[in-house]
């Protein structure tokens, strides 16, 4: 590998979303049991609430008490679907905002070398030494670089050999 690697790319909201989710998962790894418990509790509460609302409406609207259980189940199912769909809504909004902002629009560059990583575009330049990079993750369609709680991303499609790049970056990171 060379002394430095320069990659040109553009940011897509979908890829930014993937990078944000990967960063969130990386940050929450040590809190996984607690986060899972809170997540399950929220699903149970939302499903119970939706079932109660559906049951109350059914009891008010119909005289047929035999269908209330089915309506409660359907209400709980609707609550679960609602929760699953909207749980990543804040990430989606942030990803759309980031990709459409002055920072996210237009051509981007990532420069990797022995010193660290530099992400730049027409409006800004972010340079971080390898010591500041907490995590490098190669996902299905995006590289994610976690610096504190910030997700920097590089589309996998912008690189000819993603696995070779990851190996080189890990070599520089462990040496730095």
Image: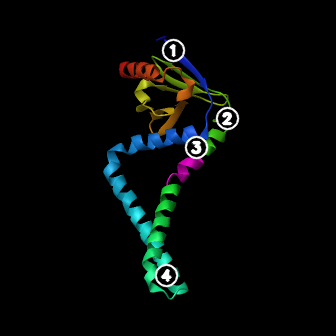
Secondary structure mostly seen in the magenta stretch: helix
Q: Secondary structure at mark 2?
A: loop
Identify the residue position indicated by label 4 in the image: 56
Seen in the picture, residue 21 relative to 76 is either above or below; the reply is above
Quadrant of the image occupied by residue 70: bottom left
Which quadrant: the C terminus? Answer: top left
- Magenta range is 87-94
Q: CA distance from mark 4 to mark 3?
A: 38 Å
Identify the residue position indicated by label 2 in the image: 105
Q: CA distance from mark 4 to mark 1?
A: 65 Å
Quadrant of the image occupied by residue 172: top left
Q: Earlier in the sequence, mark 2 or mark 3?
A: 3
Q: Is residue 66 magenta?
A: no
x, y percent for residue 32 = 34, 48
Q: CA distance from mark 1 to mark 3?
A: 29 Å
Work out whether residue 68 or residue 38 is closer to the camera in this orientation and state it.
68
Identify the residue position indicated by label 1 in the image: 4
Quadrant of the image occupied by residue 73: bottom left
């Amino acid at each position: 590998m060379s002394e430095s690697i320069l990659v040109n790319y553009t940011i897509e909201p979908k890829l930014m979303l993937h990078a944000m989710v990967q960063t969130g998962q990386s940050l929450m790894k040590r809190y996984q049991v607690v986060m899972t418990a809170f997540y399950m509790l929220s699903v149970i509460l939302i499903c119970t609430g939706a079932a109660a609302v559906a049951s109350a409406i059914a009891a008010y609207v119909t005289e047929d008490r035999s269908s209330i259980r089915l309506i409660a189940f359907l209400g709980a199912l609707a609550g679960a679907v609602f929760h699953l769909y909207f749980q990543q809504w804040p990430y989606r909004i942030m990803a759309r905002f980031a990709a459409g902002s002055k920072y996210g629009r237009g051509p981007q560059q990532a420069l990797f070398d022995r010193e660290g990583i530099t992400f730049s575009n027409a409006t800004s330049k972010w340079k971080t030494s390898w010591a500041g990079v907490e995590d490098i993750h190669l996902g299905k369609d995006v590289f994610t670089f976690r610096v504190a709680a910030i997700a920097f991303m590089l589309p996998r499609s912008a690189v000819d050999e993603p696995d070779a790049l990851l190996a080189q970056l890990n070599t520089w990171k462990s040496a730095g």
